[in-house]
Amino acid sequence: MYRQVIKPIFFLFSPEKAHHLTMALLKLTLAIPGMKWLFKRWFVLEDQRLEVEVAGLKFPNRVGLAAGFDKDGKYFESLAYLGFGSIEIGTVTPLGQPGNDAPRLFRIPKHEALINRMGFNNDGVLAMAARLKQRKGNGIIIGGNIGKNKATPNDQAASDYVRCFEALYDHVDYFVVNVSSPNTPGLRELQEKAPLQKLLHELMVMNQAKPVLRPIFLKIAPDLTNAQLDDILEIVQTTKIHGVIATNTTLDRSKLTISTEDIGAGGLSGRPLTERSTEVIRYLYDKSGKTLDIIGVGGIASAQDAIDKIQAGAKLVQVYTGMIYEGPGLMKKINASFLDTNLLETP
């Protein structure tokens, strides 16, 4: 029903308008008596065999929502009724900022893909923290994806990440350091070995001084070379962060069979990223001696895509673009497939 009826209606609107309309309708629908129960029946698969512990956190299942969908922490309570085991909110920056000029989000239906150049548009970390204070104990794991403001020079970027960490520490279950978005000028330069090691070291020193250690993951780009991935592994080991999220959007459009010159700059997500993100996961997992905690994201549009990432070495997976094209039943399909395979205790 979603692909035949609902998606064509939403695709009549621009991607950003469709997103806001969808979230407004979801909140309104769940406010109707009995709908929360129905949504749980339709979309949520609860089974103790799906539970998994990663970085000291117990996830109700392995399927999470990737960052970028709920940028300000406005919708996670509603999204919890779609079958996710975790929801990553953000990317959030210390100060609110409008992001890049619209249009900045584009569909490529032929490839079940998106191109975005959103630019970390958000209300700021204090607004997010205020919303998270109202968080209900629904058992879902919440991750905070943090970044720097566009106006902050790279040599001062650490202070932005520190401010976000401090503001969200009491309200999220884990953190994600985003230095891999292609839509903030110069941000990916922070993936270079020296500045990245300095940034992560500073955050971990703060983290270790807290009463409870919050897991910190690093989100990386799929466009890194093997030598750069080797540097990432060395940095993870040196700084003792908890794991890696592989991968963010890509600048590579070689898998597209249509021109995107009219769209312009932006990161590509969806099916064209499936193979590369899985390659990165496999490389990092094998090179780490099969010890690295990896959250796999990029091009998951089916249960088999998720299985492939688990088999490559991911402990958890995240979806975003695949859900837009496949609908809210995707998470239940993935979780059901995990129950039907022998993946629950692997890798």
Image (tube, rainbow, N blue to C red):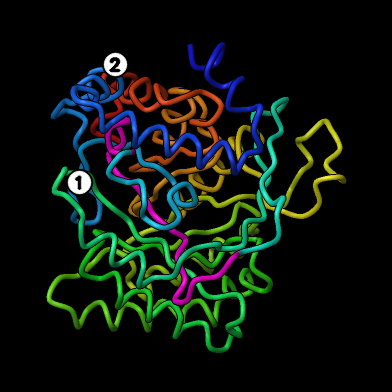
Q: Which residues are magenta?
A: 79-98
Q: Amino acid at mark 2?
A: Asp
Task: Say whether residue 39 is left or right of residue 201.
Answer: left
Task: Say whether residue 281 is left or right of residue 40.
Answer: right
Tag 1 secondary structure: strand
Residue 332 lies in quadrant? top left
Residue 208 lies in quadrant? bottom left
Q: Residue at x 44, y 85 (%)?
A: 159
Within 10 Å of the Cα at label 2, are there few (<14), some (14-19), or many (20+) other Cα atoms? Answer: few
Residue 217, relative to residue 77: is it above or below?
below
Tag 2 secondary structure: loop
State whether residue 152 appears in this view: yes
Q: Foreground residue, 33 or 73?
A: 33
Residue 116 position, x and y percent, is: 66, 49
Within 10 Å of the Cα at label 1, are there few (<14), some (14-19), or many (20+) other Cα atoms? Answer: few
Q: Foreground residue, 280 or 58?
A: 58
Mark 1 — residue?
A: 53
Residue 81, relative to residue 240: is it above or below?
above
What number is the disc on residue 340? Answer: 2
Is residue 286 inside the magenta stretch? no
Is residue 86 inside the magenta stretch? yes
Chain-order first, disc 1 or disc 2: 1
Q: Amino acid at mark 1?
A: Glu
Residue 271 position, x and y percent, is: 62, 32
Q: Foreground residue, 179 or 94?
A: 94
Q: Residue at x 43, y 39 (%)?
A: 23
